[in-house]
Amino acid sequence: MTDVASPTTTRKDWASDQEVRWCPGCGDYSILTAVQLLMPELGARREDTVFISGIGCSSRFPYYMNTYGVHSIHGRAPALATGLATARPDLHVWVITGDGDALSIGGNHLLHALRRNVNITIVLFNNQIYGLTKGQYSPTSETGKVTKSTPFGSLDFPYNPVSLALGAEASFVARTHDMDRKHMTETLRRAYEHRGAALVEIYQNCNVFNDGAFEAITSKDNRPSMLIPLEQAKPVRFGPDGAKGVVMDRNGSAAIVDVADVGEEALLVHDEGRPDPSTAFALSRLASGPHTPTPIGVFRSVERADYGSQVQDQLVAAAARKGPGDLAALLKSGTTWTVGA
Amino acid sequence: MIRFAGDSGDGMQLAGDRFTASSAIFGNDLSTLPDYPAEIRAPAGTVAGVSAFQIHISDHDIFTPGDHPNVLVAMNPAALKAHLPDLEAGAAILLNSDAFDDRALQKAGYASDPRADDSLKPFKVYEVPMTSLTMEAVKPSGTKARDAERSKNFFALGLVSWMYSRPVEPTLEWVAKRFAGNEMVQEANTLAFKAGWNFGETAEIFESAYQVKPASLPRGTYTNISGNTALAWGLVAAGQLAKLSVFLGTYPITPASDILHELSKHKNFGVRTFQAEDEIAGVSAALGASYGGALGVTTTSGPGLDLKTETIGLAISLELPLVVIDVQRGGPSTGLPTKTEQADLLQAVFGRHGEAPLPVLAPSTPGDCFYIAIEAARIALKYRTPVIVLSDGYLANGAEPWPIPDTASLPDLSAEFGFATEPNKTLPDGRQVFWPYLRDPETLARPWATPGTPGLMHRLGGLEKADGAGSVSYDPGNHELMVRLRAQKVAGIAKDVAPVSVDDPDGLGGADLLVLAWGSTYGAVQAGVKAVRSAGGRVAHAHLRHLNPFPANLGEVVRSYRRVLVPEVNLGQLRKLVRAEFLVDAQGLNKVNGLPFRRIDIQLAILAELEALAGQQNGSTARKEDK
């Protein structure tokens, strides 16, 4: 009999023998630690776990996990992962990517993986900069950013990854940041438990090329007034003593108000399972950059059949309808004739 | 051979006549067979009232049987019913779908719509709403609806002219002259003709009849098979023979899409087909599936192969099986999507950054596509490498009678490879570990451990790997070693493929001239060689299916002949490889007009080479006599 009980593992079991080579002080370390600590808690199996990445600093991640892994090519991790998760619905496939990898060179694959609801857990390390190529602006960098490639300021309008994912029909979208292990771990746990495509944006500090990009909202002192925690079935409130809240205005936009002015009953009650993504989208538009109060947590989590399972169902249905494949019969399925006796 | 058939009022004779005229201008030999209805005033829409015109264009038809059209243009159900019995399986039917209403079907004596049952299954059916498209097209001429409909013969003519690359001008000039007194009709017919032509171009309607029919077929059970169907069936077979599920990751592209269409029907074989968001995603998903233990396949044509290049390089680095099928078409860029070419050979062999060798195969006939798919899978699985298969538009859409093989005679691919199940290395401290790049000493293939296998967790990637252990390595010596090992692995496949066979009645080196060819030129070269031989010429033919690495005996073969002629539908790509590899002064016969070689092209080139050789011989004899 096969032992199907969850294995007992420790963080050490999940760490590979490779030396971690990110810059000292990089936000990636805290994400790696969070994942390595989370895996034993989840009762996950190392052999059934695959990390697939593209190119960039974050994409070194698979080398540090004692699981199966592929460090692939720039932008294509969601495409490789789609093939793997579709051919092998039994595996848990993670995609590790960054703002350049996922949103610039690989933007197309990200959209389609989300739309198809491929069973993958996508962790998007957003540091708003190209780190590996040493400091060019990224698709999430703020307009006007002065970098090596934009000495007079970037002209590009940035993406909001959460808005983008919601627009791409993602069934699970969340945001967290690298300064709060507990929140990050809980968010990753929720993403792991979601069957289908899950996208977690992590605000991650690049202390070499974009230090302090998120400090205005993620530093310990600023968090209470600048982070808006989204909690299921609870009114959306934040600020010291919960003095601030979020309401939906008459135009369908989300707006920040003083709770004292509107009363608690007027606040938006967060429902991540709402089939219509409009409210989640409105929440994602509350902040246009990490300088004003910014929602974190699970924006959207809805159930939708995942791609690989549906492909599998079609195979099973075809075999039931036509019988298992018979090669000799296939070769004779057209018009045939015989030459000679 | 094309047959236009419709109601006697449909202008079929006119369409056929104009097509004949433009073909004659095009320089084709042709014979025509008008077929008027016996009853000139037979009731419209009935079988008795069908009028037809048949054209036999004999440019590249080598052994074409006399009476069977390759294409039937049927303007109504009666025309279809009258001419269907003359069609051979695999022929193309262009239907005017607007004319297939209940009343017309009834008049033609059809109890049910033939498009809905199996009666048209053996044919390639293109349903084109010719009446409504014509009426829409001629609107600007101001023609009344009733008259507008009468221009549909010109629509059909335009469509067929596109399919057979007939020049447009002669027909348009004729229309201008013929209807000089009636501008409205002149304009309507011109518009309808152009609309038909443009429909063919936009819908990428593709017709290429592969014509190699030996006088007598050997015994066996036959079916008509096109190159694309044969590739699809070959992939299904490869999955069965390897006991692996097939995963096709692809993106629609002319002329490769039919492989996707065919494979997507066979889910009961466990075949997964994935129509990706782009070419890159198609090949990347296939590689991801291979990593998971499937037989990953991608199909494409030139522009798609360009896009897949980086992922193919990754597959070379990861050393995972992957079958890449390139159905070549005219290039560069979008080029000629519906025309054939063999100009992707050097791209397949060399077209990646870095030292990135991979095996390249090419089928020689539509039926051979079945076996080449199995051979590609065998090499990919055994050596853990991407393999490129170079088919082309001519093979893809051409069909030939194919002797159906006994499935028991097909190779057992599952015996050619295995998955890793155990650690393969003992470290000095006694620990048992898995080294993903510890190679098989014989094949140099690395072990293939798939996710889900306990204890063998490992990380792969595009960064250079340490020999054996497979961790990231920037060591200069290691990189040189790995580059050489990957090259040796691919080069070593030469020992594992069939030697190239030489068709030379006088034995190897007996003839004066060797024709060395590859891919879809097979039929024309065989016919050309036979024609020369029947006139007493001594010429040998060798046809390559393995283009990288070359079969181990190829050097000996090319050095056994005084002269080597390499015909290709490109500017001399195989010739360049043969010269570089063997220092043999091979001569080229090259064309790139989007059309396959004709028997006569090959025949004349052989005769010219033989003449040149004879001249050399006489010259040297003369010099001797001088002494």
Image: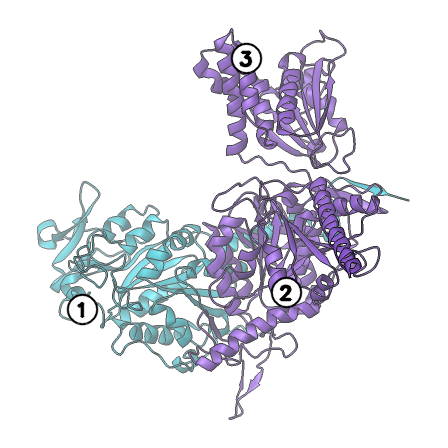
Colour of the chain lettered A: cyan
**Percent coordinates x, y for residue A39 in the rendering:** 40, 73
Badge 3 or badge 2: first in the primary sequence:
3
Say whether marks 3 and 2 touch (CB < 8 Å): no
- Quadrant occupied by the N terminus of chain A: bottom right
Q: Residues within 10 Å of mark 3 (few under 14, many from 20)?
A: few
User: Which residue is found at the position 12% from the left and 64% from the top?
Assistant: A240
> How far apart are the two marked residues, 1 and 3, measured between alpha carbons?
79 Å
- Residue matched to label 2: B583
- Quadrant occupied by the C terminus of chain A: top right
Front disc: 1 or 2: 2
Q: Chain of mark 1?
A: A
**Percent coordinates x, y for residue B36 in the rendering:** 73, 14
Q: Are marks 1 and 2 on the same chain?
A: no
Residue furthest to the right: A341
- Above or below for A130 versus B529: below
**Percent coordinates x, y for residue B149 in the rendering:** 54, 14
Front disc: 1 or 3: 3
> How far apart are the two marked residues, 3 and 2, measured between alpha carbons?
59 Å
Report the amino acid beneath label 2. Answer: Leu
- Above or below for B423 versus B191: below
- Residue matched to label 3: B177
User: Which residue is found at the position 55% from the left and 15% from the top?
Assistant: B175
- Asked if residue B550 lies left or right of residue B621, the reply is left
- Asked if residue B272 lies left or right of residue A169, the reply is right
Q: Chain of mark 2?
A: B
- Residue matched to label 1: A212
Colour of the chain lettered B: purple
Report the amino acid beneath label 3. Answer: Lys
> How far apart are the two marked residues, 1 and 2, measured between alpha carbons?
64 Å
